[in-house]
Image (cartoon, helix red, strand yellow):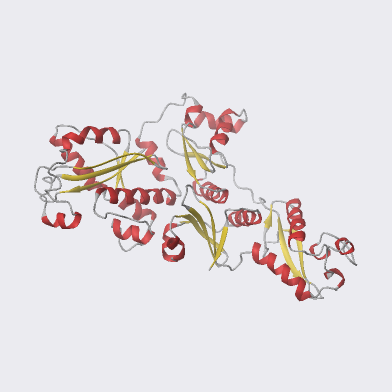
Amino acid sequence: MYAILDIESTGGKYNEEGITEIAIYKFDGHEVVDQFISLVNPERKIQSFVVGLTGINNEMLHHAPKFYEVAKRIVEITEGCIIVAHNAKFDYRMLRLEFDRLGYNFDRKTLCTVKLSKKLLPGFDSYSLGKLVKKLGIPITDRHRASGDALATVKLFKLLLEKDVNKEIISSNLKLNSISSVDQKLIRLIDDLPNAVGVYYFSNNKGDIIYVGKSKDMKKRANQHFTSDAPKSKEIQEHVVSVDFERTGNELLALLKENQSIKALKPKFNSALKKDLFTHGLYAFTDHNGYVNLCISKIKPKENYITSFTNYQQGKAFMERALETYELCQKLTGLHKTRGACFNYTIKQCHGACVEEETPESYNERVKQLIDFYDYQNKNMIIQDRGRHHGEKSVVLIENGELTGAGYTELNFQIENMSILKNIINPMPNDRDAQHIIQSYLRKSHKTMKIINF
């Protein structure tokens, strides 16, 4: 649990300042579950340059509560939380300073989004909150006011959690907080898991992630792990002490994140990805009559295929659907081995390419439509789909036929501005497994999916 906060102060000599405004958003790693926002009477003068920066003046604070009047609420909302702030050193010092004046030792662990941003978003010219959120396309209102800055920090921290492929933030959280004993009932570990699509992570008592999985229903799938008598499940049950998760909003992002996490983290109980995960591909060649033929065959390492399949049966089923959708010829798709007309020609469902009644130009145009849709080689495109909540969209970025990364957007200009989009997305390796995942997903019918070519 995190307490993401921002503090405005009077300015002045070091350790003689006072708090003028505080905003705290309690964040469970997925959403804000509580909040506290208040002006504070610092009982001392505000420096003029601070008034100009924040707009908060002494007159505004005349009837505001003094710090001792809000101290109990601050203790309660931050209890058991890690303090997160942009330049956390300052905000945490101000809190400790005010509590010291009351004779209370305020002690919390902290995370600084400046330091996290430098690590997870390298290469930026500036890591000030204002310039950082502008680069990332994160909307911010009431700049230099506690609530506006704290809420922007929530959105920034949420993005940093997504960028944290190695889950170091989660691991440090587990190591900083007391972890329940192995004897705790397993069912309690999945209480907070939603019945939603996403990726889940099982961790041991050292904070190490030992298993990564994905599911359309994470709660149901995790429960299966904890009730199974299979040897691997039994071993997982013995070692797991914490469960974390990421909502993805759709299965494509869940598959890609699972693939990336397993390869990056190498969890103890995840089997190595099989080299023959997909064995067959869809290939195209032009025959001596000028017709483009399609065929399903075993993957040829040195040849480019249009799309890939887990096995021949999956490829054949795809071809049979494509035959009807694109009005193709059974003979020229390898589904009917014959020297003459294909069967569909005899029942008037083939236009006659098999007996050269349809011209190569006419037939090949429909084949090209199929290839253009399923093959993204050398293409620049964005696959947009449902996000994790209303108003959000997921994006998968393909550049020159290669996966660049994936992430989430809430505003159209974040997609239209490529520099902002590239800052938002989480880079992903363009390996063959990721390519197969994307191509398989494109073959399915998704009402919410949209392809944006650029």
At 59% from the left and 68% from the top, the residue drawn is 378
Residue 80 vertical position relative to residue 388 in the rendered view, above or below: above
Figure quadrant of residue 379: bottom right
171 vs 309, nearest the viewer: 309
408 vs 436, nearest the viewer: 408
Image quadrant containing the N terminus: top left
Figure quadrant of residue 41: top left
Total marks shown come to 0
Q: Is residue 397 visible?
A: yes
- Asked if residue 206 lies left or right of residue 40, the reply is right
Residue 227, percent from left and from top: 58, 28
At 42% from the left and 37% from the top, the residue drawn is 207
Residue 373, percent from left and from top: 65, 64
Residue 146, percent from left and from top: 25, 48
Residue 55 vertical position relative to residue 83 in the rendered view, above or below: below
146 vs 93, nearest the viewer: 146
At 18% from the left and 32% from the top, the residue drawn is 104
